[in-house]
Image (spheres, rainbow, N blue to C red):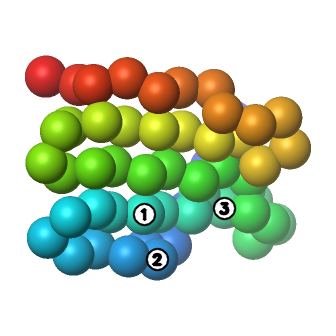
Amino acid sequence: MRTYKQNKVTDNNGKRVLLILDDNGEKEYKTIFIKDTNCLKIIDLDDGEIYNEIIK
């Protein structure tokens, strides 16, 4: 089973950006949550954007 750690990059009134690190501490994903619109983007740092939707 893989485990991940998160590293908060930005968390302000407008957005929250997290880096998701793998078991070795390598950056694997980046998430961007836009608070005004509830838009969540998940980016695989090797393959590009994998999710970009408004969540409810």
Q: Residues within 10 Å of mark 2 (few under 14, many from 20)?
A: few
The kind of residue on which mark 2 rests is: Val
In the image, residue 14 sits, relative to residue 35, either above or below, namely: below
Q: In the drawing, does residue 3 fall left or right of residue 48?
A: left
Q: Distance between the residues labelled 2 and 1?
A: 5 Å
The kind of residue on which mark 3 rests is: Leu
> Can you tell which mark lies on residue 17?
1
Q: Residue 49 appears in which quarter of the rendering? A: top right
Task: Residue 53 in the image: state x and y as whole percent.
Answer: 37, 23
Task: Residue 41 in the image: state x and y as whole percent.
Answer: 47, 38
**Which residue is labeled 2 in the image?**
9
The kind of residue on which mark 1 rests is: Val
Helix, strand or loop for disc 2: strand
Residue drawn at x 80%, y 66% as measured from the top left: 26
Q: Distance between the residues labelled 3 and 2?
A: 12 Å
Task: Residue 35 in the image: state x and y as whole percent.
Answer: 18, 51
Residue drawn at x 30%, y 36% as measured from the top left: 39
Instruction: Tell whether label 1 touches label 2 (CB within 8 Å).
Output: yes
Q: How far apart are marks 1 and 3 (CA)?
A: 13 Å
- Where's the N terminus, which quadrant? top right
Instruction: Tell whether label 3 touches label 1 (CB within 8 Å).
Output: no
Task: Residue 47 in the image: state x and y as whole percent.
Answer: 83, 35
Q: State which tag comes first along the sequence, 3 or 2.
A: 2
Helix, strand or loop for disc 1: strand
Q: Residues within 10 Å of mark 3 (few under 14, many from 20)?
A: some
Residue drawn at x 13%, y 48% as measured from the top left: 36
Is there any visible trace of residue 4 in the rendered image?
no
- Where's the C terminus, which quadrant? top left
**Which residue is labeled 3 in the image?**
21
Residue drawn at x 54%, y 39% as measured from the top left: 42
Helix, strand or loop for disc 3: strand
Q: Residue 12 appears in which quarter of the rendering? A: bottom left
